[in-house]
Image (cartoon, coloured by chain):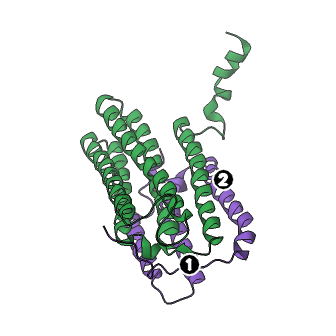
Amino acid sequence: MSDAATALHHPAVEPVESPLTPESWGKLGMWVFLAGDAMGFGVLLASYGALRAGSVDWPNPAQVLGIQLTALMTFLLICSSVTMVKALENLRKPDLARAKMFLLLTALGGAIFVGLQAYEWTHLIQRGLRVFGNPWGATLFGASFFIITGFHGLHVTGGVIYLLSVLKVISRVPDMRYNYMITEIAGLYWHFVDLVWIMVFTFIYLL
Amino acid sequence: MADTHAKHGPSYMAIFWYLAVLTVIEIAVIYLPIAKLAIGVLLVALASTKAAMVALYFMHLRLETKTLGYIALTPVAIATLLVLVLLPDSLHAPHRTADTKKIEAPKH
């Protein structure tokens, strides 16, 4: 074994001893990814604000978009965040059956959210909202609405697939510690999707 | 595992109710007979509180290492800078909101 390899295996220089070393590399990786993704959403929302501030005829979202439906969608995502933490809590006990049930409920909440979003889009398109035009005012209102809510909807769709994949893995792998770790990392992604919706709901629908 | 300490502090159900109540308050705020700027400030404050609650309690950020906290704060700092950069131009724009009640699209 070379000197470098010997040094790497010496207890004094084990990576875990470093204060910068995370408890879980997977968790660190997910946080870095989420930070990058948050910047993407941040840019979209800031651009939306700049476009809206520079427009003389921006439609009033509260009058044009359905707030009751999106409030229900917000409530649904908050509920799915709770079922996600409950899944993790049950994996720690460990109660695999209940954890799987909560994980499935979380994915179901996400699927219903996407379904409601499809319904909302269909309704708005029927009322005349297009990417490059609408009957109410500024042309870019439609573009910004579809891009931002669509980008978020894609995240939810990806999240549902991700959660179902995790569900499949924890059903097959007997290692509870590993199952806990991958569920915790998937949970970070899911809560982030919820967090972003809180901002989208406020900026696109309420302000 | 951060979750092992999750029992300290408010329960998940308590956070759920806080988030639900704050959402109802947000919807009520838009109908308040106050200045639009005040409504905007209130909405941003409420949304930021909700987002912070999700990050701190559901994502367990309050129990994580400082490194993860710094990573989470980086996009917040960059987004704030971005808004500050765009603000001078936005404030000078002749902004107004269209009265969409007068222009209703044909129903299908």
Residue B12 seen by the camera: no
Q: Is residue A112 left or right of residue A137?
A: left
Q: Amino acid at mark 2?
A: Thr
Residue carrying label 1: B97
- Quarter assignment of residue A129: bottom left
Q: Residue at x 63, y 60 (%)?
A: A47
Are circles 1 and 2 on residues that touch, CB within 8 Å?
Answer: no
Both labels 1 and 2 in a single chain: yes
* Residue A19, x across and y down, in percent: 66, 41
Q: Residue at x 54, y 60 (%)?
A: A144
Chain letter for the residue marked with disc 1 in the picture: B
Q: Which chain is green?
A: A
- Quarter assignment of residue A166: top left
Q: Nearer the viewer, residue B38 or B104?
A: B104
10 Å crowding of disc 1: few (<14), some (14-19), many (20+): some
Q: Which mark is residue B74?
A: 2
* Residue A153, x across and y down, in percent: 43, 52
Q: Which chain is purple?
A: B
Q: Amino acid at mark 1?
A: Thr
A67 shown above or below B31: above
* Of pointers 1 and 2, the one earlier in the residue sequence: 2
